[in-house]
Amino acid sequence: MTNKVEASTVLLRVVLGISFFIHGLVKFQGGIGNTAGWFDSIGIPGSLAYAVALIEMIGGFALIIGLGTRIVSALLAVVMLGAIFTAKLPAGFLGDGVGAGYELDIAFMAIAIFLAVNGSRILAVDGIISKTKQHKQESSQSV
């Protein structure tokens, strides 16, 4: 049973990582200045667009390779919470025909919270680091 849970967790981590990486990349490709302008237009400091895009892009890549999964996932959950309450809530769960709803944001946030709580070490840099630390501790205790 544990192997199924771990394999499923890897799947969630990689899919969420790819999704956020692409969302962050699009913000830069579409012109980060445009994104900053949109942030300003809805009452959020435009400079925050840079931080959000970087967290999404770098954080997404980190999730794909499994580096800092818990911390990155917590940051991404906060980004999603911010997106829901500042941009998406007025449109409703499924959207209002003009703007997208927040159903995808809630799904991303739930996955991010799951990963922040549980981590993911299989096929992950975090797992390699953990094994290296454990091996060093075992070596120093046996001396």
Image (spheres, rainbow, N blue to C red):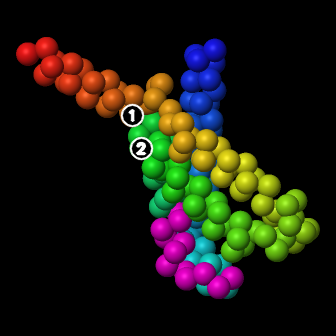
Q: Residue furthest front?
A: 141
Residue for point 80% across, 55% down: 103
User: Would you call the spot at circle 2 few (<14 residues within 10 Å), some (14-19), or many (20 or more)?
Assistant: some
Residue 75 seen by the camera: yes
Residue 106 point in image, percent of width and height: 73, 54
Which of pointers 1 and 2 lies earlier in the amino acid sequence? Answer: 2
Residue for point 46% across, 25% down: 123
Q: Residue furthest right?
A: 97
Q: Amino acid at mark 1?
A: Asp
Residue for point 19% across, 24% down: 136
Residue 28 seen by the camera: no
Is residue 8 placed above or below 113 in the rendered structure? above
Q: Along the horizontal axis of the image, is 91 left or right of 74?
A: right
Q: Secondary structure at mark 2?
A: loop
Residue for point 70% across, 71% down: 85
What are the residue bounds of the magenta stretch?
Answer: 42-53
Q: Secondary structure at mark 1?
A: helix
Classify the position of the C terminus by image quarter: top left
Q: Are the two marked residues, 1 and 2, in contact with CB atoms closer than 8 angstroms? A: yes
Which of the two residues, 22 or 65, is positioned nearer the viewer here? Answer: 65
Residue 81 point in image, percent of width and height: 65, 63
Judging by the rendered image, the residue that carries numbered circle 1 is 126
Tell whether position 44 is magenta. yes
Q: What distance separates the C-alpha of mark 1 from that of mark 2?
A: 7 Å
Classify the position of the N terminus by image quarter: top right
Q: Residue furthest left?
A: 143
Judging by the rendered image, the residue that carries numbered circle 2 is 68
Residue 112 point in image, percent of width and height: 60, 47
Q: Amino acid at mark 2?
A: Gly
Residue 100 point in image, percent of width and height: 81, 64
